[in-house]
Amino acid sequence: LAAGDHGYSAEERSLVRAMVDKHALYLSTANPTPPILQPKIRNNATMDLSIRYSLPTFLASSLLSHYGYARTKKICSLMNNPGPITIRRNSIRFDGSSKELCEWLREKDGVCAELLATLLGASEPPCGHALGGSIRFGQNMELVAPTDGSNRYTMGSSSNSGSIVPPEGAIQILPPLAKSIWSMKGWQNGYFEVQDAGSQLIVQSLEANSGESILDYCAGNGGKTFALASAIMDTNAGVGCLSAECRSATNASVLHSKIVAHDVVEERLRQIKGSLSRVGFVTHDGNHAYNGTVTAETDRMDFKCILQTSEDLDTTHGSRCFNAVLVDAPCSSTGVLRRRPSQRWDLTQRQLSELPKLQLEILEKAATFVEKDGGRLVYSTCSLLSEENERVVEEFEQSSIFLNLGLERWKFDSAMKYDLVEHDTDRGGVHSDNAHMLTLLPSATGSDGFFIARWKRGTEV
């Protein structure tokens, strides 16, 4: 069954996906190389990884060219293991701290929930759990500094040249689960959303503030849109102001924020509308038929945020610009294959060659909505491939749009809880001119694979 061949029925394609998922599970537990295949992989790294970890050869080759054999092997092995269940506290619905949410989930939903930051430094398993499977402590993420393609940040060893602080609000729910996530009271009440730690870091990188207008240009089903609203709520409340009494005292000075969720696929925006009430927004359009645009606002007095969906920004917003723009571009999803094992066989080499062109086109268009004199722009993917990440950034920074808008590289620093430190290494340390790009690689209990780059806009040329 050729990938991308539409001559087969949906049932046949579904069967193949199920077979691939089953094969991925087998590889994660058994993983010996059958003797009949050993001659095919000897002295051929691409075939070795392709057969051993069930990957298309072009995908294995692309990863090898960027990360080398040892690191690619580790990445591929993690693609065939289930990822952790990571959630994000929704501060619009839950007034307490992330630690208090963990306690609430233990008491009300009977699950073991722990702050990701706490798990990193844990010497004892939480909730009486025995360590095993994919639950490990002391090392969570790997952070890649994309300089010349060979200089790498790592975590959990004496050779670290950088570290990363898990996002505030990131919580892991540890197995076994007595019930599904969607049947938990906490989720039904809107107290949390399921969101990988790396995805939360993308939202954090935008550094959203209360009173700002923000554009989520490729909003999808709204995962990062709602995370942005929650992040703004936290800045609105202020550090150490999590109680209802504290927030009530600030009502008179509440700033009004606005988030626009844009996507060209109407069904995705329809899903956002379906989630608004649960996460803390109220619509005023009654039961009218959905026409691609819906406006809602938060249903609490101490936080004012309007959320609007839009299929056509040129029509609904014209030449209006935003304080911050997030471009979570469509991509190969190679960083999240452990969540969708069969997707590796849906991806074709032709699609991979076409995606960067689309990503650059989207990024250039979105950049025109960034306001001048300090407006912020973040580009992200859930891809591990340089074709969709560093190379797209390089082309964007050489474009006339980038130059005419006066965009400048915006470095990651401790202001956003990224603890980045420069160290001397055999390859010359971290190149400061590329400190505005980050790649998150999967690890035993850490994030899925993501890429982030960001800029600020100065005065137009």
Image (tube, grey):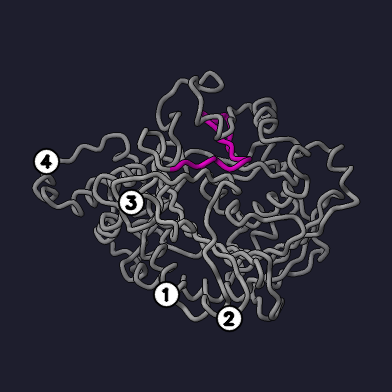
Image depth: mark 2 or mark 4 in front:
2
- Secondary structure mostly taken by the magenta-highlighted segment of the chain: loop
Quadrant for the C terminus in the image: bottom right
The numbered mark, 4 or 1, whose residue comes first in the sequence reads 4
State how far apart marks 4 and 3 are (Cα).
Answer: 43 Å
Residue 319 appearing in the image: yes
The x, y position of residue 76, in whole percent, is: 31, 47
What is the distance, in whole Å, between disc 2 and disc 4 at their CAs? 63 Å
Amino acid identity at mark 3: Gly
Residue flagged by tag 4: what amino acid is it? Pro
The numbered disc on residue 35 is: 4
Please determine whether, in this image, residue 207 is positioned above or below residue 138: below
Residue highlighted by disc 1: 357
> Closest to the observer: 247 or 306?
247
Q: Dot 1 lies on which element? A: helix
Identify the residue position indicated by label 3 in the image: 428
- Quadrant of the rendered image containing residue 444: top left
Q: Residue at x 70, y 73 (%)?
A: 291
Q: Splitting the image into 4 quarters, where does residue 77 fall? A: top left
Element on which disc 2 rests: loop
Q: Amino acid at mark 1?
A: Lys
Q: Which mark is residue 461?
A: 2
N-term-proximal mark, 2 vs 4: 4
- Magenta region: which residues? 162-180
